[in-house]
Amino acid sequence: MDEPAWSPNGDQIAFAHVPLMRKDLPKGTICTMNRFGGELRQIVSEKGRRVSQPAWSPDGEELLYQQKIGNHTQLFKINLRTGQTQKLTRGDHNFCADWFDPGVLPVQPTKQTLTTTWAEVKKE
């Protein structure tokens, strides 16, 4: 198991599995399993080159991952229900994709999200 990532609800873990057949051509896959080590599921086929860096979507329905294609590393998204894969990048090297959940950052500031300036802290 390499590069583990817990699902948003903590029920599953995704990880890269890279069996080294030949050191110059590692293949790999992304797998998931439940928190108790059961229900092992292969998510990405081992047909291609090294697959790594799984990252869960905020709703837990998709995973991002990176895969070596030719001499470049590309980012992909896979729907865990349908298995549909989408290539997100082209050319050059792309690494360590992650999700952004706009619901975490409100458009209108609230009292809880406002930062306190140093001068106000010193007054207290």
Image (cartoon, helix red, strand yellow):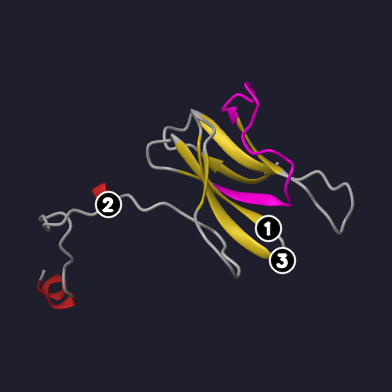
Residue at disc 3, secondary structure:
loop
Direction from residue 20 to residue 63 in the image, left or right: left
Q: Name the residue beneath numbered marker 2.
A: 102
Direction from residue 68 to residue 59 in the image, left or right: left
Residue at disc 1, secondary structure:
strand
**Tag 3 or tag 2, which sits nearer the N-term?**
3
Question: How many dots with numbers?
Answer: 3
Q: Residue at x 61, y 34 (%)?
A: 43
Q: Name the residue beneath numbered marker 3.
A: 71
As displayed, is residue 47 above or below residue 110?
above
In percent of width and height, residue 67 lies at 64, 53
> Label for residue 16?
none
Residue at disc 2, secondary structure:
helix
CA distance separating discs 1 and 2: 31 Å
From the image, give the main secondary structure of the stretch colored magenta: loop
In percent of width and height, residue 8 lies at 42, 37
Residue sitting nearer the eye, 29 or 85: 85
> Label for residue 69?
1
Q: Residue at x 23, y 54 (%)?
A: 105
Q: Is residue 36 magenta?
A: yes
Direction from residue 58 to residue 76 in the image, left or right: right
Q: Amino acid at mark 3?
A: Asn
Q: Amino acid at mark 1?
A: Ile
CA distance separating discs 3 and 1: 6 Å
Q: Which residues are magenta?
A: 33-54
Image quarter of the C terminus = bottom left
As displayed, is residue 38 above or below residue 71?
above
